[in-house]
Image (spheres, rainbow, N blue to C red):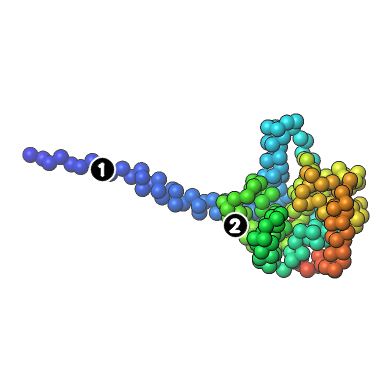
Amino acid sequence: MARPTAPAKSTMPRSLLRRLLQLPLWLAAGSLLLVLSLRWVPPVGSALMVERKLESWLDGPPIELQREWHPWAQLPNDLKMAVIAAEDQHFAEHWGFDLDAIRVALKHNELGGTLRGASTLSQQVAKNLFLWSGRSWLRKGIEAWFTALIELCWSKQRILEVYLNTAEWGDGIFGAEAAARHHFGIGAASLSTRQASLLAAVLPNPREWSASAPSAYVNRRADWITRQMRQLGGSAYLERLGGPHPSR
């Protein structure tokens, strides 16, 4: 009498497990290709722009997004320097993360009071382009990954160029050109040193602070930024970003 054969084991769990194990590799490869392509191709938008648009639909009325891409050569040196002076004075030296600034911020935050961040321009580009707002360890981890990719694949000039074309400067106002026209009624290329300093001064809170109608605090911050620009060496600092720029 033939003995009954045991039913064949399903290969579905093993196949599913294999796919799940491969998923991080595919995500890593996809993110690398995306960042690498943006070394030459101007981003059509950013995750932050999408987020702000969705917020306006939910909280009404919908905002009109304003943004116009300008390549490196058409962006004013004063604005480049003002942003570096305000947001990331070690931009030319670090590899995406300013460890000294992180230590200072952690010590400050341990003492209580207003939380202080230590995000570099590279980290801000990673967050604005690819991620969502808010504070979580998951987001910070993904931000660190994209920051490393950006530093690996892009020149410092490219990082600053993308930052200046995607930074938020008001409700629906993104990039230097839209900011200059919204706040001062001129193109970005015509910004004065003072106007550039005012735009940089409001970056920590661009939807609450105004560059065109600055508060006393914003004016004081703009004064400090102007002094920092001179101490950093002015436009000579930009030469330290080095190398031919790939964007045209």
Residue 45, percent from left and from top: 71, 44
Mark 2: amino acid: Trp
Q: Nearer the viewer, residue 201 or 161?
A: 201
Q: Residues within 10 Å of mark 2 (few under 14, many from 20)?
A: some
Q: Nearer the viewer, residue 144 or 31?
A: 144
The quarter of the picture where the C terminus appears is bottom right
Q: Is residue 94 left or right of residue 20?
A: right
Q: Residue sitting at 36 percent across and 45 percent down?
A: 13
Q: Residues within 10 Å of mark 1 (few under 14, many from 20)?
A: few
Residue 50, by quadrant, is: top right
Q: Residue sitting at 68 percent across and 32 percent down?
A: 58
**Would you name the residue on which mark 2 appears?**
145
Mark 1: amino acid: Ala
Q: Residue sitting at 87 percent across and 56 percent down?
A: 220
Secondary structure found at label 1: loop
**Would you name the residue on which mark 1 appears?**
8
